[in-house]
Amino acid sequence: MVFRCDLCRIEVPDEHVLADHTKGKRHQALLNARERFEISQNSSIYISRIKPEHDENILKDYFSRFGQIKNCFIDKEKHTYAIVEYENIDSANKCLEHSDEHKLNDGSRLKVKQRNHHEFKSKRMLISEQEFLNINKEKEIEQHAIMVQKLNNQLTIDEQAETIVEQEKITDELFKMREEFFKELEIMFIKYFPEAKLCLTGSMANSLATNLSDMDIVLILNDTYIEAQHLSSSNNSGESMNIDENSYSNDIDMNQNKFKRNASDESSNHSLSPPLQPKSCSVDDLLQMSITDRLDYIRRLLRSYAAYVCHVQRIAQARCPVVRFCHKQQKFFCELSINNHLAVANTDLIRYFLAFEPKLRPLLYTIRLWLKQKDLLGKGHRFNTYTIFWMIVCTLQLDNQQLPNVQTLTECATHKRQYGPWNCSVPDISQIQRNILNVSIENMLHNFFLFYSTFNANQYELSPWSGKLECKTSNTISFSIFDPFEHNHNLTSNISQSNWLKFQEECSLVNQILDECSRKRQHKSWGLSLILTRKSLPKQNFIHEQQQQYHHTQSIHTIELNFSNQINEEQFEKTIQFILKDILLFEQINYEIIRKKRPASSLIIENTNVTPNSLAEQLDETLSSKRRRIDDDEYTLTPIKDIPYSKEKIYFQVIYRTWQDRRKLKRHIDDENKNLSMFDREKLISNKLKEGNNHHLETPIYLSIEIKLLPTTIDENHNKANIRLELQTNEHHQLFADLSHFLNLYLPKMLEI
């Protein structure tokens, strides 16, 4: 008989060895660590309704009235909750007894409750995601350098995309090893459930996998449909995030993004109990169990009988509960769900689309690698492969109906599949009738980045089922694209606002690169090699040239205006446009004019060393400096009928320096025309400046204007507005700075603030 110490996670042969173990230093140290961990939980409070302007100092300043604070942590992704830990339990209880709502000095009302309690674990179940990805980091960087060389040797962007597929796809050797592991699992499950079927789903099943892809498996026991769980908002907000990832001490690294699991998802550990062995169980009995018991049974099967399986855990607090485990030798992760018919149907649907349009595969590999380089792919509030695929499909459905909508495909299917309320019928691949234009991968990529760089996520949402733009029904999520079969499931509900805005900005930068450098150039980087940069590479490896640096601070300027009275947004925008166009003689133009006239960036045109290090630095210095600061402002983007996907901004070209020498002319005009109104006088001054040769610019200044009214709080009796100026070209920085400074003083006077 084997005895187990669940605290230390070891097994011993008899009671005497177990008794000696409990007196040892390791066991005693863990007892003390568990005590500190429990005290830490009892001394902490959970705070919600956090606003973006709140920081740790504000929270510490307010909550220190209840006692001395030991630590304060604010959620860095959505910035919606915080955890404050006091030096003792009495301070936390005092805060909880005070009220469940607390009002800060700025009028914000915070909700406070007791922090969730989780079971102490002496060792985390899984390695961190960063550790997992860093296993072959050096090899991956070396392969990236080789890929950049290969990309620059190709003749077209289509050939570059195919090269990315060959470089990124899972190797035949690894795929064969995973296939053999899948067959071993299949044999094991059929032994216990003879009527069951084990299905491979996801990227591994559709030839979209990389060497780091997970293996998604579905155990189909029968035709019973298991509805997806609807989790409460508290679980989604991250209240339990990383709290269960315990170490030997009560110090928890909340800032590191790890593979997460709910502490309640670990089976009950009865101290010093022997390991449980799975008992015989029928399919009906298994499906009648609770979710946790059902996953526990599968987990025990894997632990006891599956070869090369380690780190087995059940994740019950998920939309689709799974058992997650790792392969000991190959170091890849598997997720196994039960009766997940929708996943199987989705895999068949993706396989159909890939057969219908083979170019979807290089499109997905290219966009996925690009997102990975921009830190927008992976766990947490980022994109995943499944979401990217349907985003690509939607753009092709909307672009001259290059792909059919899913609803049409279900109607054409001969074999009908209905799971719960969802029609999941998929036509046979032999039924494919291709009737689409022969569009290049380059055009498809360009349309993808152009579409999403200007997509108005506040007004529209996407649906592969209908293949159309739908009017948005919810304002809670920035970007929405719904599952092709499960129509009420938003695939991007996890993506944070900051990551969505960053994604849009990166898309607009790719558009600029493809416009400027989409043709092969001898001994120079071009095309896709310019967009696939690695920002994570060490800065000291980059080549710096001081004269090539682009100053971001000179390209953007924000004017803040405060009004004592209520203002009308539409009238305010008209007044601003009147001042700029009629008084200062700015000429309003279309965005396409700026895009065509914008000169190619000098850093891209000059010879480059084709290495990932130099390429990343050169592109960062050239383009990333133009990025909008997405953490401060929000943007409204909308498709316009006349010019598809153009931005809802006001673009101007400035030909005359009407902001200079105004004071000198004003004195002269006031003496001659004393009865002129303020606006007429300012118009006259600008026209006088226009007539002079000294105020004409040979090369216009291209800039954009964004106007944003800020919401007011209850305690404020005035309105606020921000006017954001952005230089659109890589020249005239000093003139733009002078103009911005002038408008910062001039507009409040003209608006009589």
Image (spheres, rainbow, N blue to C red):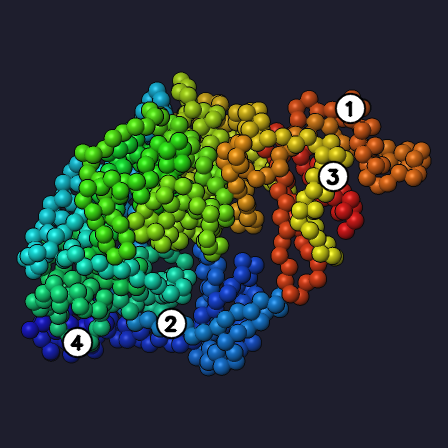
Specify which label sits upstream in the sequence, 1 or 3. Answer: 3
In the image, residue 486 sits, relative to residue 290, either above or below, namely above
- Residue behind mark 1: 694
Asked if one can make out residue 214 in the rendered structure from this viewpoint, the answer is no
CB within 8 Å, label 3 to label 2: no
Mark whose residue sits in front, 4 or 1: 1
Left or right? Give the position of 564 relative to 293: right
- Residue behind mark 2: 116
* Amino acid carrying mark 4 in the image: Leu
* Amino acid carrying mark 2 in the image: Asn
Q: CA distance from mark 4 to mark 1?
A: 90 Å
Asked which secondary structure carries label 4, the reply is: loop
Mark whose residue sits in front, 3 or 4: 3
- Residue behind mark 4: 272
Identify which residue, 691 or 636, lies in the foreground: 636
Specify which label sits upstream in the sequence, 1 or 2. Answer: 2
Asked which secondary structure carries label 3, the reply is: helix
Specify which label sits upstream in the sequence, 3 or 4. Answer: 4
- Residue behind mark 3: 579
Specify which label sits upstream in the sequence, 3 or 2. Answer: 2
Asked which secondary structure carries label 1, the reply is: helix
Specify which label sits upstream in the sequence, 4 or 1. Answer: 4
Question: Residue 232: x, y in percent?
Answer: 38, 65
At 13% from the left and 73% from the top, the residue drawn is 274
